[in-house]
Image (cartoon, coloured by chain):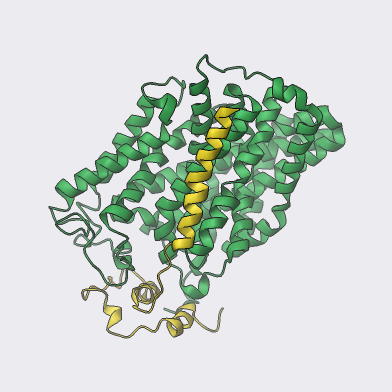
Chain colours: A yellow, B green
């Protein structure tokens, strides 16, 4: 059993106060349905300190190049052959 | 409840935290490449080789695969990688707090189907290997070996996955070598049979070269769309979008078309896509043994990734949310074992229809996710609502279902089937220049956007504001 909860470890990076644990508009997940750990995880993700993990500009360049430009080029070359 | 009391995070559908998302780009690339490179590549290549010569098939399959992979990544990727959730959970904003069960069923059927094919192929390879090595007991044929070997493979998959994502990663590190063996086999065939390969004519090619070429592209797109169910469970282990994009596009998108060329070459030159058969022809039984070991290893790695992704997807159901991981694994593996034990040949024979079926469902699903995330919600996802099943929750819609998503999915599937009948390959309308998957995704996206703006948002459902964009919520990173 881990001596240290991953939730606690993450909370050091993304500290979450008690106010935040109530959720965006004071909504709190029903305790009977969700474990406290899930609640903590959601709070950590809702933290303003949580970085944006979405695709950045570099990712979009990769997607644009390998998902659009290169396939079009390949299709053109293949058809030309 | 402490972390130690509940299931480990990588064995649950809970969002993963930064400290738990420790797969770097290389680790992710290896896991994805191991998952992608499997025997289905030969079957995919075989289908393309019916319609196209080697060079055209190479370009069409590669281009189609890259387009399909990008579609899946752009659709499911952002939500999965931002919140550390799997593909099924990422559909909740579109399908609703209960409606996500539809993509979940699609995922389950897809993965179970693929894995049944792969494990049957694995069992066939082992049976052939035993025959080549002269180790098959007298009076025992491949027909008896296949069910028993499938069962054995299921037991091994179960044992490995008891360790969760770590087990998957360890096995991937070992089995990734088979990708290189696959490339060696391709080199072998090309170097030995190049003149025949270039001059070989596809047996089912129609009179219209554009239709043939488009069909090659469509096979590539539809095949890679089938990675939608797998993707989320693996990329959620990575920390952010940047560390995911290239591994997915190259690690998962490139091996499939490359190894599919083995099947293309095999079917064109030797009229068999199974490398175990033609490698014996090309290089004797020594090469055949290498091929059989390759096939076994390749399928095994993919099956492990598939069962893992499927088990994580099932975790979203409340009924199995708190089940022990071992029980959940059993539930996931049981259908595969049943198919392998009782109907392996029947299932194997229907693979073509199965492949087509995948494109029918996943193309519209991707279209819906893309239009919702980027246009309607403008990247705003309420992470709390993803796990809130209550009636008044933002993603509850009506009784947990979003009618716009259901209509869009139905419209997209209808468009696909009209453009390309997945069973007969009879096509209509603009299929010959547009494929079937891309219009199906586009129509589903358009239907979803129109219905959402006109009805869903105005009714105040789905967490949209009156203009049809996502209402602001704390905890998202929308712009």
Which quadrant of the structure image shows residue B385? bottom left
Which of the 4 quarters of the picture holds residue B187?
top right
Q: Position of residue A54 (x, y in %)?
A: 41, 64
Q: Is residue B397 above or below residue B413?
A: below
Across and down, in percent, residue B425 comes to 46, 22
Q: Is residue B304 visible?
A: no
Task: Give the vertical position of B297 relative to B269 (above or below).
Answer: below
Horizontal side of B296 relative to B210 (left or right) equals: right
Which residue is painted at 20% across and 58% down in the image? Answer: B464
Q: Position of residue A58 (x, y in %)?
A: 49, 61
The percent coordinates of residue B175 (x first, y second) are 70, 53
Seen at 38% across and 76% down, the residue is A44
For residue B64, above or below residue B160: above
Furthest toward the top, the residue is B207
Query: Does the image show residue A23?
Result: yes
Q: Is residue B478 left or right of residue B457?
A: right
| Towards the viewer: B100 or B65 | B65
Quarter of the image for the N terminus of chain B: give it: bottom left
B467 horizontally vs B6: left or right:
left
What's the residue at 61%, 27% (across, down)? A81
Compared across the picture, whether B440 is left or right of B188 comes to left
């Amino acid at each position: 059993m881990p001596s240290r909860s991953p939730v606690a470890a993450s909370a050091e990076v993304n500290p979450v106060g008690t106010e935040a644990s109530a959720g965006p508009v004071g909504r709190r997940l029903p305790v009977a349905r969700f474990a406290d750990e899930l609640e903590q995880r959601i709070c950590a993700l809702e933290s303003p300190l949580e970085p944006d993990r979405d695709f950045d500009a570099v990712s979009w360049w990769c997607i644009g190049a390998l998902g659009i430009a290169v396939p079009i080029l390949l299709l053109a070359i293949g058809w030309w052959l | 409840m402490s972390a130690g009391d509940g299931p480990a995070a990588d064995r649950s559908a809970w969002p993963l935290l930064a400290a738990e998302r420790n797969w770097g780009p290389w680790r992710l690339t290896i896991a994805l490449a191991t998952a992608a490179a499997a025997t289905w590549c030969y079957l995919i290549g075989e289908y393309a080789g019916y319609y196209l010569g080697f060079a055209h098939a190479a370009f069409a399959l590669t281009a189609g695969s890259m387009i399909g992979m990008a579609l899946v990544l752009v659709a499911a990727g952002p939500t999965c990688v931002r919140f550390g959730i799997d593909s099924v959970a990422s559909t909740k904003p579109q399908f609703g707090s209960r409606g996500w069960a539809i993509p979940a069923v699609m995922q389950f059927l897809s993965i179970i189907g693929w894995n049944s094919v792969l494990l049957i192929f694995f069992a066939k390879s082992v049976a052939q290997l035993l025959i080549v090595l002269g180790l098959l007991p007298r009076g025992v044929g491949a027909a008896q070996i296949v069910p028993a070997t499938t069962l054995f493979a299921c037991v091994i998959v179960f044992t490995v996955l008891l360790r969760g994502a770590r087990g998957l990663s360890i096995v991937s590190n070992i089995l990734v070598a088979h990708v290189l063996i696959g490339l060696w086999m391709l080199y072998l065939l090309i170097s030995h049979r190049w003149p025949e390969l270039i001059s070989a004519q596809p047996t089912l090619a129609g009179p219209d070269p554009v239709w043939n070429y488009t069909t090659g592209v469509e096979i590539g797109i539809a095949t890679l769309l089938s990675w939608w169910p797998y993707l989320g469970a693996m990329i959620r282990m990575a920390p952010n979008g940047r560390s995911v994009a290239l591994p997915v596009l190259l690690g998962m998108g490139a091996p499939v078309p490359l190894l599919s060329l083995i099947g293309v070459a095999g079917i064109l030159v030797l009229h068999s896509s199974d490398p175990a058969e033609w490698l014996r022809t090309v290089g004797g039984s020594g090469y055949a043994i290498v091929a059989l070991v390759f096939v076994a290893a390749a399928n095994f790695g993919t099956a492990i990734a598939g069962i893992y992704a499927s088990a994580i997807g099932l975790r979203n159901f409340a009924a199995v949310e708190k089940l022990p991981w071992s029980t959940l694994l059993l539930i996931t593996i049981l259908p595969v074992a049943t198919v392998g034990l009782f109907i392996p040949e029947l299932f194997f024979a229907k693979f073509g229809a199965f492949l087509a079926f995948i494109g029918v469902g996943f193309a519209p699903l991707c279209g819906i996710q893309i239009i919702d995330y980027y246009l309607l919600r403008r990247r705003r996802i309420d992470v709390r609502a993803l796990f809130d099943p209550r009636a008044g929750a933002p993603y509850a819609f009506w009784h947990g279902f979003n009618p716009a998503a259901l209509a869009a999915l139905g419209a997209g599937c209808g468009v696909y089937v009209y453009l390309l009948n997945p069973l007969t390959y009879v096509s209509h309308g603009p299929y010959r220049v547009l494929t079937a998957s891309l219009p199906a995704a586009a129509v589903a996206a358009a239907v979803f956007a129109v219905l959402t703006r006109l009805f869903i948002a105005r009714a105040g459902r789905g967490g949209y504001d009156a203009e049809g964009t996502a209402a602001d919520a704390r905890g998202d990173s929308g712009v």
